[in-house]
């Protein structure tokens, strides 16, 4: 199975948009090249996708204006994930919901602005709205936070195959922790960006390909696909069609592919 995808309603569950005119936050760790929504639209068409989740970049901190503008530009097939301060008002959360936001991002690596200490309270605030916590971390640290994450009242979406920043095996404590979370009622994972964990690299990423095979077959209701376009700070720049094809080849059936691309994102993001 190769792009373009022919599933109606297929969704890319993690993209970033960077537009001129939106200043970076003081917490930004790098200066991204322009990556406007109009450029992503061409990528989306080439892959045969019709829906996208715009994730607030770390570089913009709590200023969600660029992300909201991208959602508006991409139209009815777009939703978003914002970054909001812990004392955000209910009115602001409702405003963001009306603009298409369906989650709050917690980046637990360089550039993140929300700490672990506020995650559970934020989850409780957004759960009634049907939002999720979008979590990026080193998957090897999952065991230290598993009990708290398993108790969250909102949905939880873990980025990029768990983003294991050191070699990972099926016996690794971080992976077994991830599986326990996925076996619970409210956890999903993005089967995306293998370059974030792989040491062997493209084109096969064979040291992490087993993650996609295992998770997609064992937890077909819990995986979603994402491009991670425009692949911030990744060199050489991945080919989006090849990345989609890599994930699809590692997934054992069209039924699971449809869940990953259409059904699971629709449930998570309210399409």
Image: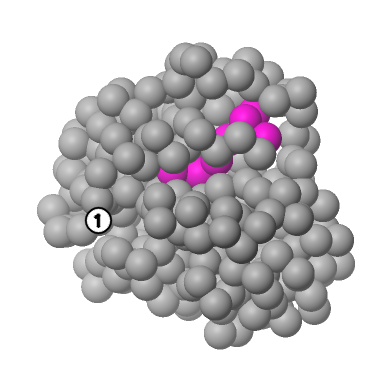
* Residue 20 counted in the magenta span: no
From the top left corner, tell me how far across and down residue 257 is, in percent: 29, 64
Q: Secondary structure at mark 1?
A: loop
Give the residue drawn at x 24%, y 73%. Answer: 255
Picture quadrant of residue 240 = top left
In the rendered image of this protein, does residue 22 appear above or below residue 105? Answer: above
Q: How many marks?
A: 1
Q: Identify the image's colour scheme: rainbow, by chain, secondary structure or one colour.
A: one colour
In the rendered image of this protein, does residue 90 appear above or below residue 96? Answer: below
Which region is colored magenta? 54-61
From the top left corner, tell me how far across and down residue 252 is, in percent: 32, 67
In the rendered image of this protein, does residue 96 appear above or below residue 146? Answer: above
From the top left corner, tell me how far across and down residue 60 is, in percent: 62, 30
Give the residue drawn at x 77%, y 49%. Answer: 114
Q: According to the image, label 1 marks what residue?
A: 10
Front position in the image: 263 or 244 = 263
* Residue 55 counted in the magenta span: yes
Give the residue drawn at x 64%, y 28%. Answer: 59
Picture quadrant of residue 220 = bottom left
């Amino acid at each position: 199975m190769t792009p373009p995808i022919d599933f109606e309603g297929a969704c890319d569950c993690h993209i970033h948009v960077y537009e001129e005119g939106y200043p970076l936050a003081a917490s930004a760790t790098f200066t991204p090249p322009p990556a406007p929504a109009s450029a992503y639209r061409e990528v989306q068409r080439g892959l045969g996708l019709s829906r996208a989740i715009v994730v607030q970049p770390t570089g913009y901190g709590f200023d969600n204006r660029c992300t909201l503008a991208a959602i508006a530009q991409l139209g009815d097939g777009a939703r978003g994930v914002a970054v909001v301060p812990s004392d955000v008002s209910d009115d602001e959360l409702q405003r963001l919901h009306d603009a298409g936001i369906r989650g709050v991002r917690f980046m637990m690596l360089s550039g993140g602005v929300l700490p672990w200490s506020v995650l559970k309270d934020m989850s409780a605030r957004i759960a009634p709205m049907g939002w999720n916590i979008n979590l990026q971390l080193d998957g090897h640290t999952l065991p230290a936070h598993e009990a708290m994450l398993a108790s969250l009242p909102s949905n939880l979406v873990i980025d990029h195959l768990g983003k294991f920043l050191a070699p990972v095996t099926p016996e690794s404590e971080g992976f077994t922790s991830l599986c326990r979370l996925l076996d619970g009622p409210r956890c999903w994972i993005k089967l995306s960006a293998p370059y974030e964990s792989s040491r062997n690299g493209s084109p096969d990423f064979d040291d992490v390909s087993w993650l996609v095979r295992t998770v997609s077959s064992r937890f077909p209701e819990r995986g979603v696909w994402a491009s991670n376009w425009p692949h911030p700070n990744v060199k050489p720049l991945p080919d989006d069609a090849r990345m989609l094809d890599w994930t699809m080849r590692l997934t054992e059936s069209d039924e699971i592919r449809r869940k990953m691309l259409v059904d699971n994102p629709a449930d998570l993001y309210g399409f």
